[in-house]
Image: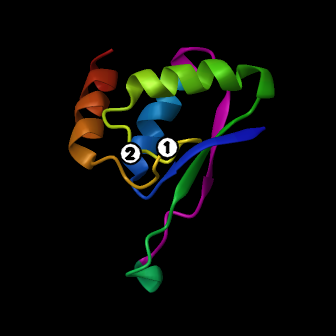
Amino acid sequence: MKMLFSSSTSLEVEVVKRKFLQAGISCEVRGDVGSEDTFPIPSYLELWVTNDADFQAALTLFRRLSPKPALSWPGGRGGDSGLSGWAEIGRQVALS
């Protein structure tokens, strides 16, 4: 099992998870969504690819889905990509 990326925006993680499952890539979300007690420290969710043999396909799909290159994926700059791009992808996923 390998971690692909993390985000403080749960929508990012959920959209990518759904796309992976649609593509037949098994994955799971780990981490804490946080609470008012953790404010102002953001909580990060992590998306893990369950089968190591699927990691390269997951990374390729993730790169195609990413609205900006600033996501926290291996070799990336880290940080959030911005909710607006992921919100649009989320609407597209909901329609498919």
| Residues in magenta, as a range | 21-35
Element carrying mark 2: loop
Element carrying mark 1: loop
Q: Mark on residue 76?
A: 1
Q: Position of residue 8 (x, y in %)?
A: 43, 59
Q: Is residue 61 visible?
A: yes
Q: Position of residue 34 (x, y in %)?
A: 49, 70
Compared to 42, does 6 lie above or below? above
At horizontal 43% and vertical 45% (from top left) the residue drawn is 71
Residue 2: quadrant of the picture? top right
At horizontal 52% and vertical 33% (from top left) the residue drawn is 17
At horizontal 47% and vertical 43% (from top left) the residue drawn is 13
Quarter holding the N terminus is top right
Instruction: Give the mark nearest the N terminus, 2 or 1.
Output: 2
Crowding near the residue tagged with mark 2, few <14, some 14–19, many ≥20 C-alpha atoms within 10 Å: some
- Tag 1: residue type? Gly
Quarter holding the C terminus is top left
Q: CA distance from mark 2 to mark 1?
A: 6 Å
Contact, mark 2 vs mark 1 (Cβ under 8 Å): yes
